[in-house]
Amino acid sequence: MRRMSMTAEQYLDLLRQGKTRWEVLKLSDADRHRRPEVSNSILETWRISIERIWMESETSYRLLHVVAYVDSQDIPQELLAAAAGRYDVDSVGSVGSQDSTRKVSELELLEAIARLREFSFLSLRQTDDAGRRYEMHKLVQEAIRYGLRVRGCVVPTISNSLRVDKGPKEDEGYYCGKALQVVDGLFPSSEPATWVRCEQYLTHAIRVGEWAEVGGTETETADLLQRASYFLYDRGRWREREPVDNRAWDLRREVLGEKHPDTIRSMASLAATYHAQGRYDEDEEISVKVLELRRRVLGEKHPDTIESMADLAATYNAQGRYDEAERLKDEALELRQEVLGEKHPDTIRSMADLATTYHAQGRYDKAEGIYQEVLELRREVLGEKHPDTIRSMADLAATYHAQGRYDEAEKLHDEALELRREVLGEKHPDTIRSMASLAATYHAQGRYDEDEEISVKVLELRRRVLGEKHPDTIESMADLAATYHAQGRYAEALQLHQTALNPSPPCAWRKASGYDAERGIPHLNAGCVTTTTVSCEVDPDFGNYASQRIK
């Protein structure tokens, strides 16, 4: 009212003009995204403000409607700039097409943002990095979307008031598509160098994924969600990844069909997520189907088919089915050597996978030879700080530990832990795994106090990052119980060990370690806990990191 220099009576008169039409539309339109507690009067009040914005600034109006389809929090100014400058003025094209665009100047953008802030549609939030982030209240977004949904009534109202004729193209589907186009252009492929940017736009990618059917952009949305899924996997955020994988799979299955290669890829991603969460039976069920489909659709020697063989072998290994795992891994390695070559990252991964099975079978000398070769190849092909190279260091350290070469194991575990902290961060599951491996080495050396200090931190981190019932968390309980036992703290050891056994069968946590070998085997004996610690680099990694980067 103050901005438009209107009296309360004039403002109420505007409300009355649109009241009947809005009530009729609200009765006939069911909006699953609009909250029941949103008052009709709020929507009607905002309708007038939106009409005013339409009259004052076309850029502000379009910006407002694009932002209604992204996440309401942490909206970077870069996203607003892309939203303001990436709409076509002649015709609507499909997402990703080369539309004729009018570039919006920085001054025009700032003026458009200022108008939206004056109407309280946007609010500014300063960040620690001196960047600008904006917020749009969820109720405002709901009102904008509702207005577009009932556009058949709103457009005549605006046109009569402003004497303009905007084409029917700018409906809800149009702005859904534009929001997707903007976020898709800003969300990069997942690499260590792009992780900060991926994090910045993750919630927006997930949010625009909700509107795929409205905008008719199912395929493009699934592609964006697949990139978001890879990022979440790389960051070890598997519980967040699961709904993203499910959504991408649903979209692709609906539009492309069950046998399309992209649909199958989404299935494989979901299986990988289950594997990383220790849900091996669900993982196996999907992985078997994926392998069958890829053999039928792509052929036996297609890289994706070979990848599925390696993935299923990893699942068998995690379940303790080592003979089946070894056969599949041998086959995958031979095919990759033939199809991809000796130094391809996927071929090197197959070598490492086979070594994990040898380790789990107690064939440590054979595992050591392969791990050393893999480490050299990865240093040459991927570089010293690549996550797979660091994993090879940890694998070799685990083998040294299993052979009783604790000083060599400690040195490599220390190096791997430092690199993972630098590259992946303190809370990444692989970093936590390196902490657990180092604690195991301290335990084997009889350095129980140092072991305990790290093991307590590992258990806390895994509970927070992975959840109480994740196999790695249960394993950490058993590890700490073993440490308490070694310190003579039998009551604490027994209590923690019993807690570890409650969520799952006694061998469940050991099977989680089976991807390499058992980390430690506590068991009840005459009312106390005894322990044999053999250590390993528990690697729940699944699928082909390098091939994900290529796709």
Image: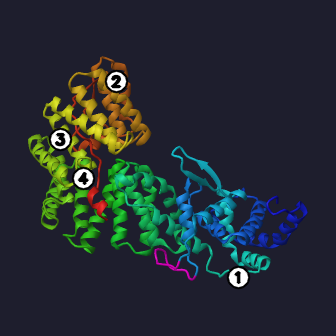
Q: Which mark is in front, 4 or 2?
A: 4
Residue type of the residue flagged with mark 2? Ala
Q: Is residue 68 visible?
A: no
Q: Which residues are magenta?
A: 90-100
Gap in Å between the C-alphas at discs 3 and 4? 18 Å
Amino acid at pointer 3: Leu
**C-beta proximity under 8 Å, tags 4 and 1:** no
Q: Is residue 325 above or below residue 296?
A: above
The numbered mark, 3 or 1, whose residue comes first in the sequence reads: 1
- At label 4, the amino acid type is Ala
Residue at the (32%, 59%) spot, across then down:
285
Instruction: Determine the secondary structure under disc 4.
Output: helix
Instruction: Identify the residue position indicated by label 2 in the image.
Output: 493
The quarter of the picture where the N terminus appears is: bottom right
Query: Mark 3 or mark 4: which is in front?
Result: 3
**Residue 464, quarter of picture:** top left
| Element marked by disc 2 | helix
Give the Cα distance between marks 3 and 1: 70 Å
SS class, disc 1: loop
Mark 4, residue position: 314
From the viewer's side, name the closer residue of 400 and 163. Answer: 163
Q: Is residue 96 magenta?
A: yes
Q: Main secondary structure of the magenta part?
A: loop
- Measuring from the top left, give residue 500's x and y in whole percent: 36, 33
Q: Which residue is mark 3?
A: 396
Q: Position of residue 26 (x, y in %)?
A: 74, 69
Q: Do we see residue 539 in this rendering? A: yes
Query: CA gap, disc 2 to disc 1?
Result: 76 Å
Q: Identify the mark nearer the N-term, 4 or 2.
A: 4
Foreground mark, 3 or 1, reads: 1
Q: Which residue is mark 1?
A: 165
